[in-house]
Image (tube, grey):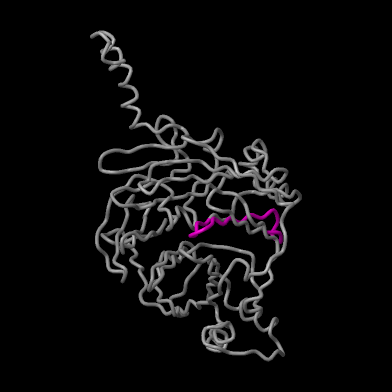
């Protein structure tokens, strides 16, 4: 018992405890690692209504004079949403009718101005815009009015929490080349060392970045050059690395590294082999997780998992028994309750005409036929349609 120890034993015990106390400022490489096996041979077709409650469509109704060029990152709130137009460094603020409320296009180097956008994030009714060339986060109101700037260190993606933020650096940083950092007023903690050889991969801000599970508060980040999803608690502390295993469809690590500077050879290899290059999307919903992968342009899989990461559905084909429209098995981002993808409005128009040509359709408020009838002429223009699938 400690009470029976003499003075020297107590001193020894104290010194032994010091490294443990200091280690709180250094994150362990992994508190836990979870491997989730996905057997794509068990995939099957499914009806849309088995997994989704409804479909909604929103036309992004911007003008020809000020268009969206290459939509990239999106952020959603209850009464509006934000779309980053990457090529012309603009942020479009829409209401849920698809009408433009404002365009943030502050070109320059002064306060509240930017030349490029490297990410946007909503936190506590503040729109945060990461501008890499200024190493700053520009803060705006939900109506697009400039508030302030905050200087930050270089990163590829950010998550903003209450009194902390998490940054992701693809290339790694610091002595141990950590790729994630939890930053607060009190300290900075690094997590997850870069995998050997991965410093050669291209670094970029992803169109989704960090996501937050509204039901648990946990935060997730899907890696691009591996099958890993990093898990953090609601306070931004690292919890777990979830590694997905696709068996014979895995991309051999030695080939992945060998192809870093051989993109044409990599493209040819992936074209001729049923290999999963990466996880396309990983989303969190109230009762389930969702991920999608593909091993060819025409072969995609939608995978639903429970909250313990156990797969309960692997889908390779979907029948739209909700409204009959031709659903694309693609994803872009998510709201708290919906999977979202975008489609060129002209393609949407052509798909609709081809699907429902010479059919008698019933137009009711809010259905696809009502949407098409209201926007028929605008759909022929160069715009985008958001398709939103509400998850059960």
Left or right, 208 with respect to 8, comes to: right
**Which contiguous range is marked in magenta?**
283-300
**Coordinates of residue 140 in the picture (x, y in percent):** 30, 64
Quadrant of the image occupied by residue 305: bottom right
Helix, strand or loop for the magenta stretch, by majority: strand
**Coordinates of residue 220 in the picture (x, y in percent):** 47, 50
Where's the C terminus, which quadrant? bottom right
Name the residue rendered at 53%, 57% in the picture.
288
Quadrant of the image occupied by residue 105: bottom left
Name the residue rendered at 25%, 43% in the picture.
185
47 or 324: which is nearer to us? 47
In the picture shown, does residue 21 fall above or below 90? Answer: above
280 or 379: which is nearer to us? 280
Name the residue rendered at 34%, 60% in the picture.
114
In the picture shown, does residue 330 fall above or below 154? Answer: below
**Coordinates of residue 88 in the picture (x, y in percent):** 44, 66
Where's the N terminus, which quadrant? top left
Name the residue rendered at 53%, 37% in the picture.
33
274 or 247: which is nearer to us? 247
Q: Is residue 40 magenta?
A: no
In the picture shown, does residue 158 fall above or below 337? Answer: above
Q: Is residue 288 magenta?
A: yes
Count of numbered circles on the image = 0
**Coordinates of residue 90 in the picture (x, y in percent):** 40, 67
């Amino acid at each position: 018992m400690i009470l029976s120890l003499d003075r020297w034993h107590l001193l020894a015990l104290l010194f032994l405890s010091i490294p443990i106390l200091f280690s709180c400022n250094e994150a362990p490489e992994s508190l836990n690692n979870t491997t989730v096996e996905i057997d794509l041979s068990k995939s099957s077709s499914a009806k849309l209504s088995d997994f989704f409650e409804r479909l909604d469509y929103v036309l992004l109704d911007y003008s020809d004079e000020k268009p969206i060029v290459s939509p990239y990152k999106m952020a959603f709130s209850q009464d509006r949403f934000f779309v980053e137009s990457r090529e012309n460094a603009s942020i479009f603020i829409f209401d849920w009718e698809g009408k433009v409320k404002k365009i943030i296009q502050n070109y320059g180097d002064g306060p509240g101005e930017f030349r490029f956008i490297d990410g946007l994030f909503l936190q506590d009714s503040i729109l945060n815009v990461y501008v890499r060339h200024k190493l700053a986060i520009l803060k705006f109101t939900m109506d697009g009015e400039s508030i302030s700037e905050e200087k930050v260190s270089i990163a590829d993606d950010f998550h903003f929490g209450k009194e902390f933020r998490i940054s992701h650096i693809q290339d790694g940083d610091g002595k141990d080349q950590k790729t994630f950092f939890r930053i607060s007023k009190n300290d900075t903690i690094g997590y997850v060392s870069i995998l050997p050889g991965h410093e050669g991969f291209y670094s970029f801000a992803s169109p989704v970045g960090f996501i937050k599970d509204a039901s648990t508060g946990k935060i997730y980040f899907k890696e691009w050059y591996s099958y890993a999803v990093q898990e953090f608690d609601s306070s931004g502390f690292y919890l777990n690395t979830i590694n997905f295993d696709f068996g014979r469809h895995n991309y051999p690590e030695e080939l992945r590294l060998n192809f870093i500077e051989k993109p044409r050879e990599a493209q040819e290899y992936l074209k001729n082999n049923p290999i999963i290059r990466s996880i396309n999307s990983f989303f969190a919903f109230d009762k389930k997780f969702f991920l999608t992968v593909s091993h060819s342009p025409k072969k995609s899989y939608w995978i639903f998992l429970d909250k313990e990461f156990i797969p309960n559905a692997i889908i390779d084909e979907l029948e739209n028994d909700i409204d009959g429209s031709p659903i694309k098995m693609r994803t872009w981002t998510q709201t708290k309750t919906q999977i979202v993808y975008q489609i060129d409005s002209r393609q949407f128009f052509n798909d609709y005409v081809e699907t429902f040509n010479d059919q008698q359709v019933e137009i009711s408020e809010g259905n696809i036929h009502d949407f098409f009838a209201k926007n028929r002429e605008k759909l022929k223009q160069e715009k985008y349609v958001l398709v939103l699938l509400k998850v059960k």
